[in-house]
């Protein structure tokens, strides 16, 4: 299979599956418990229909948006995700370069495999830093100071991960950092030698945002233990409010799902919220972000930028979210599978297809600007 023969999310997923050892593929593809929320995230878009208008004289399509003070050439951005150089040796470098080419936002995670500073050097476009709240308050302050000096535009605090989700696929294969593979997991690596050659012939795997604070080698600390031992489950609104004041800039909470929490985010001075259930990887059975979008936009959409992620696989999904009031839409697996399949070329192919789909769909909707999409353009069954 070749990347030019991939036309949609499912093609990219199949290509990545053919290349990756099963434990790594399952780490990307898997979710919590019975993976109900994971499936629901995409299925939720199917309950909503688009209402096109015709004979509107559509010529040029404007798909640019402004979100949290950042100018994006398209209303889709690459959400920060962990461990990207495990999937392909280029990792975040590929995503940064592809996002810059398409004029959109991307992010580096606390568990990223390329440093904030290197990613900033690759792309001068909007960059977010996604981080977790640690028990060590000094570490939190140090991370924010580092992000500020690196020129990060938006701080994005993930608030739905004070403990790791129950990802049973990873338990079966023994996926962890460092690897603690079961025999079945080891056999899967042996079946994909090309990945192993790629992994060992490139630079050593690192977690640059954490390496001065966390020992990930020598059998010391796995990713799951990072979540259970270093992150603070007692994280409170007072803690976040202090961070918002200290950052004194664009500050976003990722993982907000209730109206009450959205209003609290406004109260403490956040400039954005991402409605998200972490791709179904945390609390299985939680509501899909798209299903929750309208009521949160109605409650706080005139006071804070509301974004959503989860299950987005098509341009029509993006249009439906924008019509409900989302300022932009984040994607994760949508670009991770292409990254795993072909590095930067894969991410660029995915973003190009999304751009083409949005432009085509806007023409078919009779709408020349994504900013003109509204609830007159959709109906729920």
Image: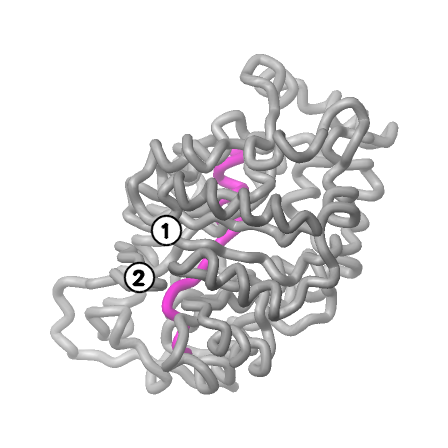
Q: In this figure, what is the number of numbered marks?
A: 2
Mark found first going from the N terminus, 2 or 1: 2
User: Residue 367: image x %, image y %?
Assistant: 23, 73
Q: Farthest residue toward the right?
A: 183
Query: Does dot 1 land on a helix, a strand or a loop?
Result: loop
What segment carries the magenta color? 324-341
Q: Residue at x 71, y 29 (%)?
A: 215
Query: In the figure, is residue 236 to the left or right of 168?
Result: left
- Indicate whether residue 327 is drawn in magenta: yes
Query: Does dot 2 land on a helix, a strand or a loop?
Result: loop
Query: In the figure, is residue 297 to the left or right of 362?
Result: right
User: Residue 180: image x %, image y %?
Assistant: 82, 30
User: Residue 130: image x %, image y %?
Assistant: 52, 50
User: To which quarter of the image does residue 318 belong?
Assistant: bottom left
Residue contact at pointers 2 and 1, CB within 8 angstroms:
yes
Q: Residues within 10 Å of mark 1 (few under 14, many from 20)?
A: many
Q: Which residue is mark 1?
A: 153
User: Residue 75: image x %, image y %?
Assistant: 34, 60
- Indicate whether residue 322 is drawn in magenta: no
Q: Which mark is residue 69?
A: 2
Residue 19 seen in render? no
Q: Residue at x 59, y 73 (%)?
A: 257
Q: In front: 157, or 58? A: 157
Q: In front: 336, or 381? A: 336
Query: In the figure, is residue 302 to the left or right of 172?
Result: left
Give the colour scheme of this rendering: one colour
Q: Residues within 10 Å of mark 2 (few under 14, many from 20)?
A: some
Q: Residue at x 44, y 79 (%)?
A: 49
Residue 56 seen in render? yes
Q: Farthest residue toward the top?
A: 201
User: To which quarter of the image does residue 66 belong?
Assistant: bottom left
**Alpha-carbon distance for marks 2 and 1?**
9 Å
């Amino acid at each position: 299979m070749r990347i030019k023969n991939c036309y949609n999310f499912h093609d990219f997923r199949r290509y990545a599956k053919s290349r990756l050892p099963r434990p790594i593929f399952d780490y990307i593809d898997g979710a919590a418990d019975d993976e109900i929320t994971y499936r629901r995230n995409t299925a939720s878009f199917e309950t909503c229909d688009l209402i096109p208008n015709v004979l509107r004289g559509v010529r040029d399509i404007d798909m640019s948006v402004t979100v949290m003070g950042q100018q994006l050439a398209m209303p889709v951005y690459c959400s920060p995700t962990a461990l990207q150089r495990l999937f392909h040796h280029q990792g975040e470098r590929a995503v940064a370069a592809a996002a810059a080419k398409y004029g959109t936002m991307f992010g580096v995670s606390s568990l990223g495999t390329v440093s904030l500073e290197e990613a900033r050097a690759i792309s001068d476009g909007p960059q977010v830093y996604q981080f977790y709240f640690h028990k060590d308050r000094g570490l939190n302050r140090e991370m924010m100071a580092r992000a500020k000096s690196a020129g990060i535009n938006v701080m994005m605090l993930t608030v739905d991960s004070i403990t790791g989700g129950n990802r049973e696929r990873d338990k079966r294969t023994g996926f962890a950092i460092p690897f603690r593979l079961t025999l079945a997991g080891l056999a899967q690596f042996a079946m994909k030698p090309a990945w192993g050659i790629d992994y060992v012939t490139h630079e050593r795997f690192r977690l640059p945002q954490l390496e001065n604070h966390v020992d990930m080698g020598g059998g010391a600390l796995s990713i799951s233990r990072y979540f259970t031992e270093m992150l603070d489950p007692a994280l409170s609104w007072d803690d976040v409010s202090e961070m918002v004041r200290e950052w004194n800039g664009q500050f976003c909470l990722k993982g907000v799902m209730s109206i009450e929490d959205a209003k609290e985010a406004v109260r403490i001075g956040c400039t954005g919220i991402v409605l998200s259930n972490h791709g179904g990887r945390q609390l299985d059975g939680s509501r899909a972000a798209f299903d929750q979008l309208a009521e949160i936009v109605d409650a706080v959409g005139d006071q804070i930028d509301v974004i959503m992620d989860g299950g987005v696989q098509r341009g029509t999904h993006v249009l439906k979210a924008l019509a409900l009031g989302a300022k932009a839409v984040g994607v994760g697996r949508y670009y991770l599978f292409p990254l795993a399949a072909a590095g930067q070329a894969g991410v660029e192919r995915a973003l190009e297809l999304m751009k083409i789909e949005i432009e085509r769909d806007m023409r078919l909707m009779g709408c020349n600007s994504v900013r003109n999409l509204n609830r007159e353009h959709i109906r729920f069954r």
